[in-house]
Amino acid sequence: MAALTDLTIAQLSATLAKKEASAVEVADAHLKKLDEHRALNAFITETPDKAREMARASDDRRARGEAGLLEGVPLAIKDLFCTEGVQTTAGSQILKGFVPQYESTVTANLWKSGAVMVGKTNLDEFAMGSSNMTSHFGGVENPWKRKGDNRKLVPGGSSGGSAAAVAAYMVPGSTGTDTGGSIRQPAAFCGIVGLKPTYGRCSRWGVVAFASSLDQPGPFARTVEDTALMLQAMSGHDPKDSTSAPLPVPDFAAAARDPGIKGMKVGIPKEYRVDGTSEEIVALWARGMDMLKAAGAEPVEVSLPHTKYALPAYYIVAPAECSSNLARYDGVRFGQRVPGKDLTELYENTRGAGFGKETRRRILIGTYVLSAGYYDAYYKKAQQIRALIARDFKEAFEKCDVLLTPTAPTAAFAAGDKMDDPVTMYLNDMFTIPASMAGLPGISVPAGLDKDGLPLGLQLIGRAFDEETLLRGAAALEKAAAFVGRPAGY
Amino acid sequence: MSLDKDTVARIARLARLKVPDEELAPLAGELSGIFAWIEQLNEVDTKNVEPMSSVSDVTLPMRADKVTDGGVAAKVLANAPGGAVYVDPSDKNAGGFFTVPKVLE
């Protein structure tokens, strides 16, 4: 029998259902992996006691015949989701020691379906970053390394810890959040599957806010089917999030088990052929289209004319929303406090000491673009461009069912690279941000290895609330690419 | 668009963010670089384009104006960084206060 930690969520569920292992045994096997690979720094808080307690409760439920969709499956949770009684930091010093008194809707949904939490994963501070290097708790190491090169690589970001934990077989699945690519880009860098659902599919209630009009929780796993299973458990209308879609939850897993894509129209947006993309990724993109074509899909050239403006527009919208959202960290009601001679100085000292460099930078950008006299020139302009980007996608989806693009312009880079110029780092998200701006679902599927032996991902983008078609396309791509890579030593 | 040190100091003040003097000049340089890159948006004609503030086109739902939650003052105050003061220490859910430095003389 394969090691319990090698199993996918679907396989673990079958193993547990057949009573070949108990949830407690499954939890222990994964907790041992957390011990073994602690050097990756994937977790900010490990919760072994809670995991065993939840696993025991899961075994009891199963014995009573009450098994849920993810019964007994160990998961890691991005430390941006509030978890009742368990420290939640958002990767920031300002929230160090913050213990939420309530549970986020998405994690509550996961526990309701029987899942078991093993810990809270590391991330870029307040989910702002593409490398996990902005975390107050130190960067996460990608389990993958270049062939013959021992340098540490980044796992991508911001959900880097969640992606690394799944890639290193510490857990079969984890949660992330995606504002401009924070699920899809780390999934590509770590050789796993990452799905950003349609904005509104998963509740944002209890998720530490970064940019509220863009933030969306989603799953990581090693297979498309597993991400579908997780999405199914995470989704659903939540009256506590006014932007949560009042829609029923489809059978996502059934869609993922059906890679039949005969006649599916796959759009290739010509504007995604941009300078700076690695040649290997351009070649992989073409191979990906060939694979889908061989599976019965029909390629369609489409145009998304405003693609190049998505990134600069995002760097107005996201910081603007971030500067408003992060106003709550004032040292009064929760989080760290640094005293001052009066209340204003208390605010300034607390925020100056509690926020890291990138967070401070984004708060300043946001404050500036929203300040008197600049609002129309920046914020309103960016919102108008956002409308044009959404219109581009709408027109493209009149000609196709999904879009195929690369996920990121390069494979994982070395820790410390791209740190000198913020714009260079921002460019990492050039292929993921447009769909975020339009609120569309996207999935990154590992599709091959580059010459250095690092995983590369391809992205599929779907119509709003049509994750089923997206999952069918992703399953077909997964099947054809037959990615079997595994980081050495994990 | 180029930002100078004074502008950075002004927006830092607006954001209630203490930025040490020696960081103002490097920040001005970084932010100017970011805004220079953002300038490309001016290439796009956005005349008569309705700004998009949210992708969800649903109108915000209304609910009945009824109390649906409450009686959890102890939870609300549990993470107070300056400590909390309770109206009735024997019943923390009866209500209480966050504490801040003296505001009025």
Image (tube, rainbow, N blue to C red):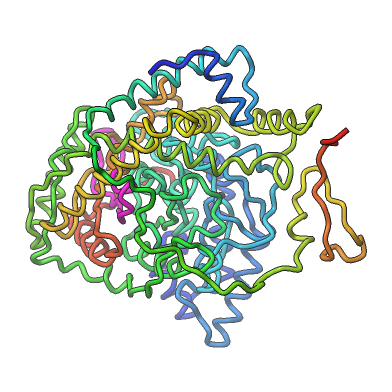
Which corner quadrant of the image does residue A256 belong to?
Answer: bottom left
**Towards the viewer: A368 or A293:** A368
Q: Is residue A189 above or below residue A201?
A: above
Is A15 drawn above or below residue B29 in the view shown? below
Q: Name which quarter of the figure residue A291 lies in.
A: bottom left
Q: Position of residue A360 (x, y in %)?
A: 55, 29
Magenta stretch: includes residue A54: no
Q: Residue at x 77, y 55 (%)?
A: B78
Q: Judge from the rendering whether residue A340 lies leftward or rightward of residue A69; answer left or right.
A: right
Q: Is residue A420 above or below residue A79?
A: above
Q: Which quadrant is home to the N terminus of chain A?
A: bottom left
**Residue under the image location 35 percent in, 65 percent down:** A228
Q: Please tell me whether residue A437 belongs to the stretch shown in magenta.
A: yes
Residue A62 in percent (x, y) is at 54, 82
In the rendered structure, the answer to whether residue A350 lies left or right of residue B5 reads right
Residue segment shown in magenta: A434-454
| Whole-percent x, y for residue B72 in the image | 75, 65
Residue at the location (41% across, 55% down)?
Answer: A220
